Amino acid sequence: MRRDPKRLNHPWVIYLIGLFVLLMTLFVLAGVVNHLAFSHHGPGLLLPLVEKFQEKESDILQEFEQHRLAEEHRHFHRIVDYPQAPEALRPTCFICHSTLPHGKEKKIRAMLNMHTNFFACETCHLEIKEEEVVVYQWYSPVEENPQGPFFGTSYDPESGELKRTDDHLSQIVPFYKKDGKLVPTLHMEKTDMAKDYMRVRDQLTPEQREGMVKKFHEDILPKGPECHTCHATDGILDFKKLGFSEKRIVDLQNLSIKGMITKYDEFYLPDLFKSSDGSQLPEAMPPPEPDGQEQ
């Protein structure tokens, strides 16, 4: 009876070489497909199909983002990274106004924008009706009942700066008191509508745009309160109840910048870059170029 010859086992190196050749073939094939179908440097056969289903990024939102970055570098002496809430959990206001919304009054815009680290827009701009009862509390977009300690409430004894905490997302927010429950006043339900408005605003007539803007600002005041509304011993914010340290409370209630803002219309800085004969000394860094936007 004839017997089949015994099959010899191939060396394992042969299998590795075969696997390498297979992977290289798939890699080259993927590159060819990408070049033919999706690359802007090739025929781009499927690019029209992709662009049809891909949501176009708003030019307006890009412009606001560039404005936000420019504002950070223009108005603050030291730039530090601080946590941001996920985009889906940010208030509707930031869709149109960005995270640095104050830009009209050059004298105080940096200070006002600094407040957005600690307050929601509604804290200063909510129109409170007579029949409404409002309570100011800490609100977190990622935690239902934040306990703190919250950023901005105390100083670091070693550095003298605001003490770093694990909670940099919570802000002081007005809550409606309804039926024994506290309901945050944040305008979160209009986020999708605001995004849709930003996409189509250029297609609307001036009257239509004005109507939509009014709809977004139904209970919003265009101008916030004066400094002494909060920075005073009898202000609307109970700093002690909100968890602020004694030293921080004293500083906030006796903020010296209040008088500088309300008493003076012009600020004069010494000519640090002029020599004794009045000529301009070379600066270490050139001044920032204007971005062409109205501030």
Image (spheres, helix red, strand yellow):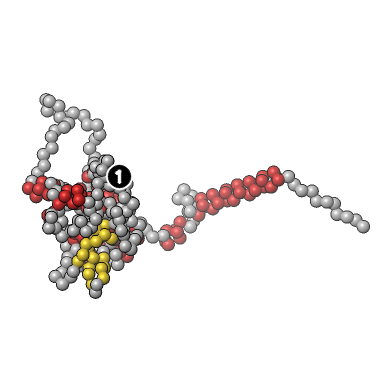
Secondary structure of residue under mark 1: loop
Extreme residue toward the top, this view? 277
**Picture quadrant where residue 183 is located:** bottom left
The residue located at (28%, 51%) in the rendering is 151
Badge 1: few (under 14), some or many (20 or more) residues near its Cα, within 10 Å? few
Indicate left or right for 52 with 266 as reference: right
Which residue is at the far right? 1
Q: Is residue 32 above or below residue 220?
A: above
**Residue 69: horizontal and vertical position, in percent?**
28, 47
Is the N terminus in the top left, top right, bottom left or bottom right quadrant? bottom right
Q: Amino acid at mark 1?
A: Val
Query: Where in the figure is residue 211, as x and y percent of width and height?
Result: 21, 67
Q: Position of residue 149 (x, y in %)?
A: 29, 54
* Image quarter of residue 221: bottom left
Q: Is residue 140 left or right of residue 210?
A: right
In-front residue for pair 167/288: 167
**Residue at position x 57%, y 49% from top?**
27
Residue 294 seen = no
Q: At 9% from the left edge and 48% from the top edge, which residue is drawn?
A: 259
| Quadrant in which residue 177 is drawn | bottom left
Q: Which residue is mark 1?
A: 80
Can you see residue 277? yes
Q: How many marks?
A: 1
**Seen from this angle, which residue lies furthest bottom?**
179
